[in-house]
């Protein structure tokens, strides 16, 4: 039985060539990144690594950043 992330990866692979122009492909990519982050937070490293690997195989590099913001009181 396929998992949700497997279905998203398959859909993204089908639309990969139109990623820059396709809103749906970008939405799938965004969801995959959110699932990957959720997997990390829930210590589901198998899913995290699988998504990372599949995106890398498609030529999609992920850049993780930590953002710090400040506000005046």
Image: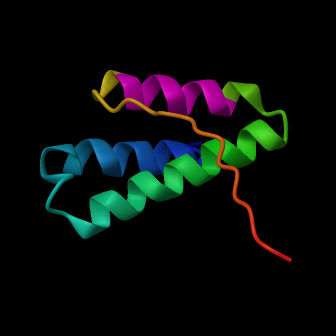
* 38 sits left or right of 25 in the view: right
Residue in view at x 74 percent, y 62 percent: 70
Tell me the chief SS of the magenta region: helix
Q: In which quarter of the image is residue 26?
A: bottom left
Q: Percent from the top left, x then y, of residue 56?
A: 38, 24
Residue in view at x 28 percent, y 41 percent: 13
Q: Percent from the top left, x then y, of residue 30?
A: 46, 56
Q: In the rendered view, tell whether residue 62 sits above or below residue 6.
A: above
Residue in view at x 53 percent, y 33 percent: 51
Residue 53 forms part of the magenta stretch: yes
* 14 sits left or right of 70 in the view: left
Start-end of magenta stretch: 47-56
Using the image as rendered, state which of residue 42 and residue 63 is in the foreground: 63
- The colour scheme used here is rainbow
Residue 14 forms part of the magenta stretch: no
Q: In which quarter of the image is residue 47?
A: top right
Q: In the rendered view, tell whether residue 38 sits above or below residue 28.
A: above
Using the image as rendered, state which of residue 66 and residue 61 is in the foreground: 66
Using the image as rendered, state which of residue 3 and residue 69 is in the foreground: 69
Q: Which residue lies furthest to the bottom in this view?
A: 73
Q: In the rendered view, tell whether residue 65 sits above or below residue 46.
A: below
Using the image as rendered, state which of residue 70 and residue 8 is in the foreground: 70
Residue in view at x 73 percent, y 41 percent: 39
Q: Exactly how many numbered labels are in the figure?
A: 0
Q: In which quarter of the image is the C terminus?
A: bottom right
Q: Quadrant of the N terminus?
A: top right
* 9 sits left or right of 37 in the view: left
* 49 sits left or right of 31 in the view: right
Q: Percent from the top left, x then y, of residue 46?
A: 70, 25
Q: Percent from the top left, x then y, of residue 63?
A: 48, 33
């Amino acid at each position: 039985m396929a998992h949700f992330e497997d279905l998203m990866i398959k859909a993204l692979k089908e639309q990969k060539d139109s990623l820059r122009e396709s809103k749906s492909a970008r939405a799938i990519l965004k969801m995959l990144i959110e699932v990957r982050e959720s997997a990390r937070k829930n210590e589901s490293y198998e899913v995290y690594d699988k998504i990372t690997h599949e995106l890398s195989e498609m030529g999609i590099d992920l850049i993780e950043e930590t953002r710090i913001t400040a506000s005046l009181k």
